Image: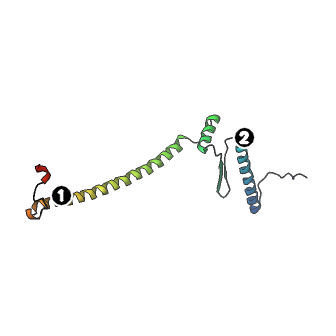
Amino acid sequence: MGRGKIEIKRIENSSNRQVTYSKRRNGIMKKAKEITVLCDAKVSLIIFASSGKMHEYCSPSTKLIDILDQYQKTSGKKLWDAKHETKFLEEDNKQLNFIVNQQQLTYENVREHMDHHGYHRAARADFNSQMPFAFRVQPMQPNLQERM
């Protein structure tokens, strides 16, 4: 005995709708994986539940961006326009500017630190020139090997 046909319409009962969604989502994911293995097909599947939760599958041999680029070239449909690309570039630019500013601050801190220690080194050299001759460590006799 075969399965009975159901009318394709929205399921009103929310718990029944959720159970059906979960079962059908798992089924379509399984089919996507099977067609990838059996037919060496490039498959990408994205499902958004009514709650906003995302489920995805992408063939192991490919990347989603590659599939989207191929779709855009083949179908001639623009998936995103220049406005969206500009938005992404602006966000990248903000992140890069933030990193540059952090590195600039780090560089300035290191430079200040080095200048501070350089100041002390110069003060030490000045102190050495003022130190009495008797306290300086110097050999009493030149190297004996140099005489021969």
Furthest residue toward right: 1
Q: Residue visible at 10% across and 57% down?
A: 141
Residue 102 vs residue 16, the one in the foreground: 102
Amino acid identity at mark 2: Cys
In the image, taking residue 92 as reference, residue 71 lies left or right, namely right
Q: Residue 14 location in percent, x, y?
A: 74, 61
User: Percent position (x, y) of residue 108?
Assistant: 31, 55
Tell me the tag on residue 39. Answer: 2
Image coords of residue 3 (percent x, y): 87, 52
Q: Residue at x 65, y 51 (%)?
A: 56
Amino acid type at mark 1: Ala
The percent coordinates of residue 92 (x first, y second) are: 47, 48
Q: Quadrant of residue 115?
A: bottom left
Q: Is residue 110 left or right of residue 2?
A: left
Label 2 crowd (10 A; few <14 / some 14-19 / many >=20): few
Query: Which residue is identified by label 1?
Result: 122
What is the count of numbered marks? Answer: 2
First-in-chain label (1 vs 2): 2
Give the colour scheme shown: rainbow
Determine the secondary structure under disc 2. helix
- In the depicted structure, whether residue 75 falls above or below residue 15: above
Which of 140 and 96 lies nearest the eye of the viewer? Answer: 140
Residue 78 shows in the view? no
**Identity of the residue drawn at 73% across and 43% down:** 38
Identify whether 16 is placed above or below 6: below
Q: CA distance from mark 1 to mark 2?
A: 76 Å
Label 1, residues with CA under 10 Å away: few <14, some 14-19, many ≥20: few
